[in-house]
Image (spheres, grey):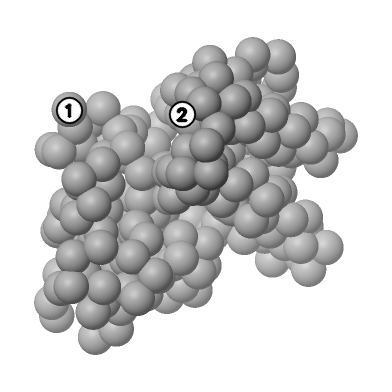
């Protein structure tokens, strides 16, 4: 069987999510790097794989999968290893909701594409940074409230879920924009996750294309 190929970039938090999921599931893969700052994700050969020109994309099982949340759920449904979504429907919905706070409502409005568009509309550096900080702060605050009644060490108890994967990756962006990390519970979850080899190996600074 052909080894999966992950198209990503070390600083792409969406790629980071998929790296974590692949590691948790024990799925070996090859890397194909596309430098976001150089616009390599808009090259014709990559657009043929992912018409959105976004990272990541995963070539696996004879298909090309895009969107990190969809990729992670595919891996959960097809690969062995710890389950990333609980069996109970209510718990599963809550984990998905927490992950989607990041995937749908936080990261997309502070990513490179949106920030470049704001610059193009004439906002200065301080205004653009302020936009990103507000988006991240609001998203993490909502996430913190969603898991407030859950016991640790992870977001939803003793098992790593999609929520942990998306949280840890988003905290990288939070630090990049110097967001005030005022949520002890989220930082405790992050610490527990980063103690796991699957998260540590997937970290941006540990990737071959890291700068």
Above or below — where is 53 with respect to 24?
below
The Cα–Cα distance between marks 1 and 2, rounded to whole angstroms, is 15 Å
> x, y (%) of residue 111?
49, 44
Q: Which residue: 23% across, 52% down? A: 39
Residue 79: % across, % down: 39, 69
* Rendering coords of residue 190 (x, y %): 54, 26
Give me the disc on residue 172.
2
Q: Nearer the viewer, residue 9 or 69?
A: 9
The residue depicted at 49 percent of the width and 23 percent of the height is: 125
Residue under the image location 68 percent in, 50 percent down = 105
What label sits on residue 184 in the rendered view?
none
| Circle 1 residue | 211
Direction bottom: furthest residue: 62
Q: Earlier in the sequence, mark 1 or mark 2?
A: 2
Q: Is residue 186 left or right of residue 65?
A: right
Height in image: 108 above or below 122? below
Q: Quadrant of residue 143?
A: top right
Compared across the picture, whether 79 is left or right of 125 comes to: left
- From the viewer's side, name the closer residue of 152 and 191: 191
Above or below 51: residue 29 = above
Q: Quadrant of residue 195?
A: top left
**Secondary structure of residue under mark 2:** helix
Q: Farthest residue in the right direction?
A: 149
Q: Look at 14% across and 80% down and name the residue there.
A: 1
């Amino acid at each position: 069987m052909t080894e999966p190929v992950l198209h990503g970039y070390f600083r792409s938090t969406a790629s980071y999510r998929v790296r974590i999921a692949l590691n948790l599931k024990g799925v070996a893969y090859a890397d194909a790097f596309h430098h976001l700052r150089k616009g390599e994700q808009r090259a014709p050969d990559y657009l043929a794989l992912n018409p959105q020109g976004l990272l990541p994309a995963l070539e696996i099982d004879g298909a090309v999968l895009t969107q990190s949340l969809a990729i992670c759920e595919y891996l959960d449904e097809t690969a062995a290893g710890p389950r990333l979504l609980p069996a109970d429907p209510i718990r599963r919905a809550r984990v998905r909701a927490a992950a989607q706070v990041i995937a749908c409502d936080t990261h997309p409005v502070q990513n490179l594409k949106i920030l470049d568009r704001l610059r193009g509309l004439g906002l200065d550096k301080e205004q653009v940074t302020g936009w990103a900080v507000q988006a991240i702060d609001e998203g993490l605050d909502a996430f913190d409230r969603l898991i407030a009644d859950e016991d640790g060490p992870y977001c939803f108890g003793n098992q790593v879920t999609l929520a942990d994967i998306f949280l840890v990756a988003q905290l990288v962006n939070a630090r990049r924009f110097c967001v005030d990390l005022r949520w002890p519970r989220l930082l405790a979850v992050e610490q527990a996750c980063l103690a796991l080899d699957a998260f540590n190996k997937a970290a941006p600074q540990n990737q071959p294309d890291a700068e």
